[in-house]
Amino acid sequence: MAVMSRRRVIQLVLVGVVVFLVAPRLSWNLPGGLEKLGLQQSPAAVAVACWAAAVAAWAYAVSRPRPVYLVDLSGYVAGASHEASRAKTIAHFGRCGRFSDESMAFQKRMLERSGLGEQTHFPASLISVPVDMCLRTAREESHAVIFGVVDDLLRRARVAGGDVGVLIFNSSLLSPTPSFTSLIANRYGMRRDVVSHNLSGMGCSAGIIAIDLAKRLLQVHSDTYALVVSTENITLNAYMGNNRPMLVTNTLFRVGGAAILLSNRRADRRRAKYQLIHTVRTHRGAHDQSFGCVTQEEDDAGCVGVSLAKELMVVAGEALRTNITTLGPLVLPMSEQLRFLATVVLNRVFRARVRAYLPDFKLAFDHFCIHAGGRGVLDELERSLNLSAWHMEPSRMTLCRFGNTSSSSLWYELAYCEAKGRIRKGDRVWQIAFGSGFKCNSAVWKALRTVDGGEEGNPWTPEIDVLPIHVPKVSPIDETTYKFADGATYKISLG
């Protein structure tokens, strides 16, 4: 608001100066000219006016928001030893001896309906016998992800660590000391004045929050890069108890992460992939139901996990409606805005009980990257926004191939669009993320150039030609098909 008010003052100064300089021409049509109005222009006054116009024009130019470009991005793909088929997942959960037979049967049913495929990744700590959940293995998991994506991104972008002026890292459930931003600064030799922020506890929507924070910082710090790293740690956050609302996360969350390089340098526009157009953040933490629908807690046995309330879908829908109410006027064509306004007037003024009009966001966006939180979330968003299977394909394939990777899932989805050769110059991309608290955040990007499929470093490139694949609503699991190193198998028993 302060920036806008300053720009308004500058605009008024420019208008005043223009009127002052143009007044003599207008006065030719007045009897007696300016003298009759008591107005005269001396050379000194004209000089002062010109100087004021120049200063106001300069101030207006520097007060304009700096454009923020996305230079490149990188998504993490774990090695083959980390791959966990659904049968392998159930077998290892069963052999660890922490779950009751009822809990194992519940997790199997959830996994059969989850939309996850056979090549998602677990950290080594959870697919070893016995499981090895400790701070050491948690660090090993996060370090592999962070160094993997940042090494790849800086190499392909041809940017040194010392060139980065803003560093933002987000991981919701693991925040060690020293922080992960310090780890990155140390590893890549970043400069002493790097502006760093370590975000935690903000859930799956933290990736967009990090982008929004980077955008704001790039308005202050000129001619520099911002490095954003988004991931989540699985090792210390797998739930080893028997409380059903806390078991769901075991069937959804998998290893993943992404690094994104942003820039406000004008020279980078030529090679950048996208320009950030809008970010819209919605926080419904003031509502008790929203605040408590996703919580990290202990069960009665002292096992820590993340509990998902049954009201989650209702809360997510309310947050989405609030978010798109703000976003809509910024992106929708006027025809859609007028239709929406008409239904509001009919309902609130004339009590007509007309069904609220849901704008067609396909008129504003070419691609949709919806957080791959689970099949239920994607089904509901597809229905609510009236999207096609083609629009939902990046999110559904991300869920199938990588699982729910928390805040980084949006970047796997964007990378999927790139790998498929779908991104054309001028296209607009809408990223939508949901997270605990409860939050719904959006980012809108405009493609600055056509992105060719099959780029080096894209996590989808090796297998993009066989995608998409059909993911059935229910896909049965036979856990006995997986054999442990000692030749043993596991079978769920219900008595």
Image (cartoon, rainbow, N blue to C red):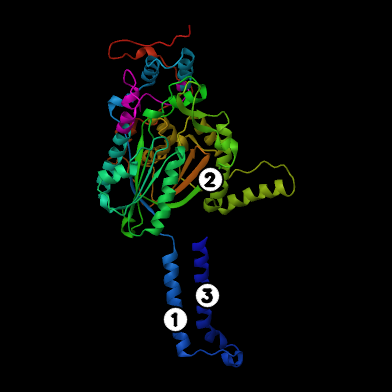
Amino acid residing under circle 1: Cys
Amino acid residing under circle 2: Thr
Locate residue 421 relative to residue 48 in the image: left or right: left
Q: Nearer the viewer, residue 349 or 89?
A: 89
Real-space Cα separation, disc 1 to disc 3, in angstroms: 12 Å
Read off the residue under disc 3: 15
Magenta stretch bounds: 111-140
Read off the residue under disc 1: 50
> Is residue 123 highlighted in magenta?
yes
Secondary structure, mark 2, is strand
Between discs 1 and 3, the one toward the N terminus? 3
Q: Is residue 71 visible?
A: yes
Residue 192 image position (x, y, % from top left): 29, 53
Q: Is residue 200 above or below residue 120?
A: below
| Disc 1 to disc 2: CB gap under 8 Å | no
Q: In the image, what residue occupies the spot 57% across and 28% down?
A: 310
Read off the residue under disc 2: 282
